[in-house]
Image (cartoon, rainbow, N blue to C red):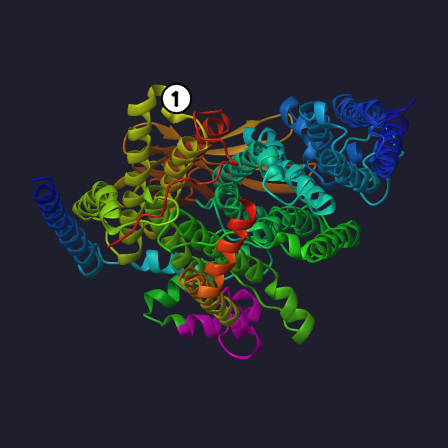
Amino acid sequence: MSNSSLGAAAVALGVAASITGLVVVAMGLSNRRGTWKREVHWLVGVMTFAAIAAVVIMERALITRDFTVAYVAENGSSRTPALFNFATLWAALEGSILLWTMILTGFVVAVVVKFRDRHDDPMVGWALFTLFVVTTFFFMLMMGPANPFGTFDPPPGFDGPGPNPLLQNHVLMAFHPPVLYLGYVGFTVPFAFAISALITGRVGEGWLVATRRWTVMAWGFLTLGIVLGAWWSYETLGWGGYWAWDPVENASLLPWLTGTAFIHSVMVQERRGMLRVWNLSLVVATFSLTILGTFITRSGVLNSVHAFVESGIGPWILTFFGLIVVVSLGLIAWRGDQLRSPGRIDSPVSREGAFLANNVLFAAFAFVVLLGTVFPLIVEAVDGRTISVGNPYFDRMTMPIGFSLLFLMAVAPVLPWRKASPGVMSQRLIGPAWFAAAVVVFSVLVGARGWAPLLAFALGGFAAGASARQLILATRRQGWRGLVGRTNGGMIVHIGVILIAVAFAASNAYVRQDEFNLVPGQTATMSGHELTYEGSTVIEYSNRTERVARVRIDGGQVYVPAVATYPFAGQSINIPSVRSTAVDDIALSVLSFPEGDDDAVLLRSTIQPLIVWLWIGGIVIAVGTAMAVTPGTRRRPTEPASAPVETVA
Amino acid sequence: MLGLGSASRSKSRLWSWIGAAVIGVSALLYGSIASGEPRTNAERAHSLSNQFACPVCDGQSVAQSDASVARIIRREIRTWVDEGRTTDYIRTQLVADFGEDVDYTPSASGITSLVWILPVVAGAGAVTGLFFVFRRWKLEADLEPTKEDVALVESARADQS
């Protein structure tokens, strides 16, 4: 059998197993006999086997350059290097849906294994039902508008164009999409349990506790995926930027914002029994936004350098998105009475008050990003005009929210639950305040200017001081175990976020960019750095021809920005070369080479401070997330706060 | 003695706060007001290039794109900056040449003003809502039991015993 036939059979098997699983779980739930456990295990196994088999068949087709598979004919090439050929699976729309589905079935297996002793529990049953609905949708996509196993009749000697050249010039192509998908897809599990809680009426804290680690892990993968994407853009696109408020970038940020709000607000529900509707709404919003992001990335409605080609998948995803929103909101409205919070917040100046403020800010942030992203579509629909919303809007609107969140990151960790006294606050925050002052003084002494970046550094120092204080106290009490558990791991995550915020502020405020025409041997000076052009060479690769400029920076190492021409894709791209240090980055790219070897090259140089701390911040967040999901010594999460309210005279 | 020690600590902590605030705010103000290195024309041109979309690209700004039209616009912007033109002049010229959608800053008039107004309105609504919620919680907390409430509880306790 051909790869196309085998792949189509695997997808059909997945659809059948998924739909059968849906029916079997529904029958088990309606009969309340709990006899579906063995059948469900079997069906989940078949469904997962089908997804893995489909991926393996596609990889086989790519590796063997089987151009009778349309996906391989359109995206594969005999000239593509092995690593990028393997990663071609997720280089285009159909393959990306295949990867998404395989990861989703992996999560379903993990749920079945984790809750193997609770399969008779309707909470787990309805969660599995919801998961089967989602897997059915994605398998159906592969039967319809995102069919990866379409056939092609290649003429003799046919060779494909290979993936988009931008997707085959950096090793992060192999890592960024899978990690990002682990984040996107991971949020399906808390969503499924939220729906289950609404259907069963068990809307207390049980579903939150059951899915807490799943949520944190999904959030960690999404964060790491976004940071890796930024790093990839920075190293690949050649303009010295890592974040451009592009619609596809925004589509990944939206679930991150609501997911971040959720992992904070669940603590209020666990400790005080409050914010039930809000938490359910946040988890529904997070999952819905991952689906909306899929729509934005794959429907072609918005222009983006990161988007897949336009396809007929848009209406399917939009319908599924609408279904999720309508069903979820309907269930929340249905359970309205049970969702009333039994508690209340005693004081705005308390841990729960800070979390509430944090949630309002994250919701506002998400609203601004969503509005700015879809606003051109609204204006076009209403007024027929085409407009753009970009950097100036997003920077201006999100900056005050970012400052407020940094302030809260400093204050919230030191606040006690229920009510804080000024004395306690004063004592706990004085260290971080001095650290913030020291950071501003140091920044001014080294030449930093401008109120916005300096305020970001000050608030970053304040928040870092508060996080460090918490970690120092915890490790004094518990040794190395003071670094694990949700609270302490969360503080490590905070330090990572602060590193990214400070690096973001510095690199945006103090970016320098210029273009130079240089003949061989000529030197340009920029912000105290010397750039000497030493000439160019041409290098032939299997899939491209590179013309490489040799540029010596500050009399030291030679850097090699290049222009790569991919003849079969009919496209030339820039390959920047970056010198990274802890202080600043110099990103070089060639805008145009001369005809003759002795003529001038047009070189673009971008100098930005603290860029490397963006990536270090991402690593710190990953480490912190791993620490946060490692069990620490803490009170039981469902235990109510027992401390009496402090009386303030 | 304990009370005196506590008062002394509070006082010294207050002075510590004042010290941190004075030093931090002074440095912040100095850094905000004092001019650093003068902004070069190249830097201003780069900043402006980030505020306009490349007319032929998929979601890239003039600063980001390597397309030839983006390079031409970058050169035009640099020329206008060298001539001392204002940002408004440059914006008007580029919109006239390439259309409204090259401008990444939505206009603050007409229907596009909603993109600026709606977040402010939503933010104000959220803050007002939170104010009333906290007020209601405070009022509930301040409720004193009436004589009837006390009698009802006493009677229930008596029934239980």
The quadrant in which the N terminus of chain B is found is: top left
Q: Is the magenta stretch mostly helix, strand or loop?
A: helix
Residue tagged 1: A481
Q: What residue type is labelled 1?
A: Arg
**Disc 1 chain ID:** A
Q: Is residue B98 shown in magenta?
A: yes
Q: Position of residue B139 (x, y in %)?
A: 42, 65
Q: In this view, does A530 lie to the left or right of B6?
A: right
Instruction: Name the foreground residue: A526 vs A298.
Output: A298
Q: What stretch is highlighted in magenta?
A: B88-115
Q: Is residue B113 above or below residue A137?
A: below
Instruction: Name the foreground residue: A630 vs A604.
Output: A630
Instruction: Name the foreground residue: B121 vs A541.
Output: B121
The residue lying at 61 percent from left, 35 percent from top is A211
Question: Judging from the image, what secondary structure is the residue with disc 1 in?
Answer: helix
Q: In this view, does A334 lie to the left or right of A524?
A: right
